[in-house]
Image: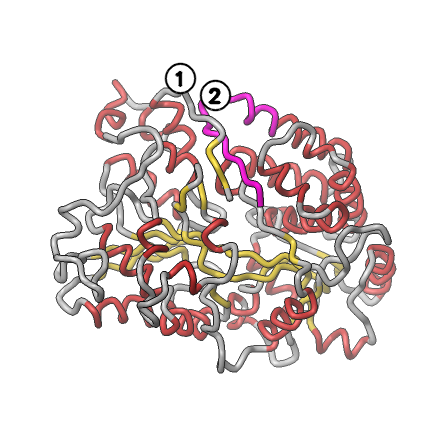
Amino acid sequence: MTNSAGSPKDITRRQMLRRIGLTALVAGPAGSMLSACATGGGGSDATPTAASSAAATSAANPFGVKADAALEVVIFKGGLGDSYATDVHEPLYKKEFPGATVKHVATQQIAQTLQPRFASGDVPDFIANSGSDLMDNGALQTEGQLLDLTALFEAPSIDDPSKKIKDTLIPGTVESGLIAGKPYILNYVSSGYGLWYNAKLFQEKGWAAPKTFDEFKTLCETIKKAGLTPYAYAGKNASYYQYWMILITAAKVEGNQVLLDIDNLADGAWTKDSVKQSAAAWAEIGKFMDKSYEGLIHTEVQTRQNQDKIAFYPSGSWLENEQKSNTPATFEYAVTPTPSLTSADKMPFEAIRSAAGEPYIIPAKAKNTAGALEYARIMLSKEGAKGFTEKSGSLTVVSGAAEGLSLSPGLKSVNDALTAAGANIVTYSSFENWYKELETELRKQTNSLMFGRISADEFCANMQKKADSVKADSSITKQNRTV
């Protein structure tokens, strides 16, 4: 679980708006936008207001949704697309409330699109806060902008009203969305993370996915001689794909405690031997990359992999669906866990990161928070989750929702990898939601490491310096997790 480990005492309004990303909006004459954005400050325990919950509550309508209240849904249109919302979740909501108008907004620029609206107080009701331009959830929560989702997880399941929603989800789902000890984030997608490759190409070439970093480097030499780029990721907007791999390897070396220490801003967490060893190993793989890829975005690199110009690509299980329009019949997605670093690794080669991800939030000051909660409850039904998997090519956190579905090669590969991993699961990271400044610095340092500008020791030292800075900043609410 997570717990608040202190709260900002001397935080200014401008400091918090800076964390959310609104300084450009408040820098004008007399700071006019500052007074226009009336927020409560501090963590919010907000629940649906009377205005947004005009109807009486019942077993079928536990949040008291007003039947004709409009609902606005903003979806990050990335690897998952947005047809799951337009073709599944929104129609299910309309079926339940036919008199309601559902406004759908799709964008790849979440923060750019929504920051002015948070500043003005005109917020949507439900948001998929994801992508490289996501908003800082930790700052939003501290500023009182996020709705506490306890009522959602305690609500009866649509499929079995005798069960609470929280009891129908895979373990760790609720915990992964805690801020200050309360669930402010719904992490909806169950993703497996690893190295992706073309199974057909590897079979044709007689290549086998490596189980150790020594095998990885040897295979990269072979792939390079065959005229392919052995390994690549997109440095312009997706360096986080790569830092996931660095953190996974560190966890395999030491165990998941290193990731908890990083989340908890523990002294010296980034300079641990496990992190240094992982960074050094990945820096060696970086030598096989094309340096021009630092200036490319993820879809450009992924399309080159579909053209068999790249052998390995780090990502999560949404990749296959994201690339489906560019994937030729000669390409069959498969995933392999990150290689083992040493024979003394605490976790075996089969260990893989599997986590509830893809964060969805409800603004505390939305006009229809009750409707947003019901929309989320529909998402967490088996019908909503099954439809999501069919449209997005990704699994959800709803237990058993994928039963009976015909899985694509890539998704089957993820499922097989998770089966092989068993209990050897690399845990999620929470700093990405808690400390946006730290996450942004990690993107920068990851590129510097992988494209050869700094050493592993410098990478670790630079990240530790930033973590120490965040820890010392009294304007940032500190979090803590124990599992």
Q: Is residue 326 above or below residue 139?
A: below
According to the image, label 2 marks what residue?
A: 474
Q: Which of 32 and 304 is in front in this view?
A: 32
Residue at 36%, 23% (x, y): give it.
14
Q: Is mark 2 on a helix, strand or loop?
A: loop
Q: Nearer the viewer, residue 420 or 285?
A: 420
Real-space Cα distance between discs 2 and 1? 7 Å
The x, y position of residue 27, in whole percent, is 33, 23
Residue at the location (58% across, 24% down)? Answer: 469
**Residue at the image position 23 percent from the left and 30 percent from the top:** 38
Residue 31 showing in the rendered view: yes
Q: Which disc, if any, is residue 416?
A: none
Query: Does residue 189 appear left or right of residue 346 in this picture?
Result: left
Badge 1 amino acid: Asp
Graded by Cα atoms within 10 Å as few (under 14), some (14 to 19) or many (20 or more), the crowding at tag 2 reads some
Q: Which amino acid does label 2 sit on?
A: Ser
Q: Is residue 136 visible?
A: no
In x, y percent, where is residue 167? Answer: 43, 61
Give, as a single range, the part of the protein colored magenta.
467-483
Question: Is there a contact, CB below 8 Å, between mark 2 and mark 1?
Answer: yes
Task: Measuring from the top left, give residue 340's x and y in whole percent.
Answer: 79, 56
Residue under numbered circle 1: 10
